[in-house]
Amino acid sequence: MKKEPILDALKRRVILGDGALGTYFYENGVPLTANIDLLNITDPALVEEAHEDYVRAGAELLETNTFGANRVKLQGLLDKGVGVTEVVAKGVRIAKKVAGERLYVAGSIGPTGLFPLKDREDEQKKEAFYAIKEVVEVMSDEGVDLILLETFSFLDELLIGIEACKSVAPDLPVVAQMVFPSKGLSVDGRDALFCAEEAIKAGADGFGSNCGRGVRSMIEAFSSLAPLKGKVPLSAFPNAGLPEIVGHRTIYSAQPSYMALGLSEMIKMGARLVGGCCGTTPSHIKEFKKRLHLKGPSKRISAQTKDEAIPTGEGLIPDSPGALLKGFPKGRIPILVELDPPTHLDCADVIRGAKALKETGVVDAITLAENPLAILRADNLALAHLIQEQVGIDTVCHMTCRDRNVLAIQNRIMGAHLLGIKGILAVTGDPATASDQPGTTGVFNMDSIGLVRTIKNFNQGVNLAGRPIKTKTDFSVGVAFSYRPSNPELQLARLQKKRDQGADFVMTQPLFSKDEIEAMMELVGTMEMLIFPGIFPLISARNAEFLHNEVPGITVPQEIRDRLWAYEKVEDQRKAAFELTVQLIDSIKDFVQGIYIISPLNKWEVSKKLLETISIPSQKA
């Protein structure tokens, strides 16, 4: 028996789609720099295997491996004999072969890469229209069940895509999906409901969201789509949390069970087509099918079963720990408190918080992240200078490799010296794909290991090229450490490399257990760096679940999450969480070398109250 038309099926039930193809290919050895659409030609067996694994997991809809297969993105390959028609047609045929007669095939079409528009607006709009139209013509001829326009950041480009689809095949269903990174808004500031209504007006048969910043941010967008529930099918394909670079791999931390809970919320809000985007795998789809109790076709049909070296300057690394560490008081362990620069230009509250924290008498430096999670914030170097001038407390500026080439990174180091900054935390930086800003791409001329060495070169009085800079900087250089009890080897090896390049201190990701902190200290305490375990005062059960499932490198123990969920009221959860944090600090104060407090949601009042509650441990001799 053949399948019914997909729009008819979506009126009656939820259909489970597949997960990420890119993630699958990268996990199977395809280089991150490869054009994965070309795998339809160069390695069709791998593409087929990916579809097969998603079918085995329970997917009822397969997306073609054609997300970027348009003439704009394939431009450099067209001269080499690669044709858009060939890549798209082969992608559809592979998916249809696996889908057989009972599963659906969605033709995947992503943005053209021409938006945001620059100086040739009319030409670029026309170019985008014809680029998408060309792909739709092939997909229509090859017999896809629907077109999935996905990961569009700009409404204007999405509307062009819908117009192109309907100009070719007016009766071919189109589901339009956009990215809403934060607060239910697109990167160009459009509300999700407004985008949906405009897309439907333009001819879309369904609307939804994919990619983005994980389940929770997608639920924010879905909450505004309530007026559309039952009127048109909505779709939800979230990422598996936020991405994190570990070694040379991009890791997504959200667990399948957590994502399934989020999808169940969105199904209640009207989602009828669900699946996964970046970071999701067949194991996620299998869990979705089980936990969401989705009924697929009665019988599954399948075709078959089956460091580049970083250049450095010359010279020995100085023994000096740098000005920040040398200035720490004697007689008690040092304390760092993190505040995030605001996402706007009003820094008054952050400066007010820094003053209040200084008044506790025990905070030795304020640490300021640089666009954490690739979200645009005020410049941390400028804010650090304001805090030092207006508050009179030292700062530690996080410095990423994501946003600058080698020239700009060294320029940044020189600027930090001129502004009197004493401490720098060298970090590689979160992947730019998580950004809330259109067109953001990562640079990554070097990673955090290379950045440590570069800063130490400046402490010797030379730049990366070995040329003198007429003075020596005196930075204390910190590094981040994500301790994973189940498999610490990779991060430990990287930490040792950072130490070998001269790192002076370590700031860890948040840890919530005395046993984990003690085990971590035993592993890294012999590396001759000052270790600051990260302490994050939780503020609710939902906050704990979000950190555990959607923030890279953070694990909140199940017993803590269960304890917080035992309280119905958020104020009771907050009180219990605060008590747990006080107990944690009290249990570790005899063996830690320092404390690094991360203000939750930038609520410096919580950090201040914590510091006024705990007994500050004495410094070990």
Image (cartoon, rainbow, N blue to C red):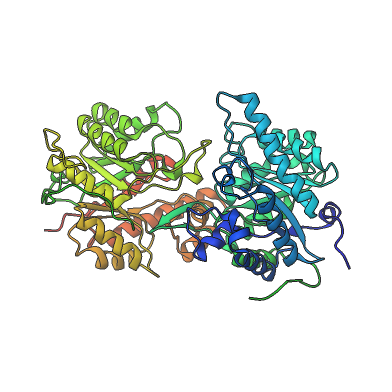
- The picture quadrant where one finds residue 255 is bottom right
Rendered view: 81 above or below 524: above
Quadrant (top left/top right/bottom left/bottom right) for the N terminus: bottom right
Rendered view: 427 above or below 469: below
Find residue 372 and report its horizontal and vertical position in percent.
42, 43
Q: Residue at x 78, y 63 (%)?
A: 103
Q: Is residue 294 visible?
A: no
- The picture quadrant where one finds residue 187 is top right
Q: Residue at x 75, y 50 (%)?
A: 139
Question: Nearest the camera: 465 or 538?
Answer: 465
Taking the image as shown, residue 208 lies to the left or right of residue 439, namely right
Taking the image as shown, residue 346 lies to the left or right of residue 397, namely right
Question: Nearest the camera: 433 or 107?
Answer: 107
Find residue 4 and report its horizontal and vertical position in percent.
87, 59
Q: Residue at x 22, y 49 (%)?
A: 312
Find residue 251 and report its horizontal and vertical position in percent.
47, 58
Question: Nearest the camera: 480 or 512?
Answer: 480
Quadrant (top left/top right/bottom left/bottom right) for the C terminus: bottom left
Q: Is residue 307 visible?
A: yes
Taking the image as shown, residue 457 lies to the left or right of residue 5, namely left
- The picture quadrant where one finds residue 396 is top left
Residue farthest toward the right in the current orientation of the protein = 1
Find residue 263 and report its horizontal and vertical position in percent.
66, 55
Residue farthest toward the bottom in the current orientation of the protein = 305
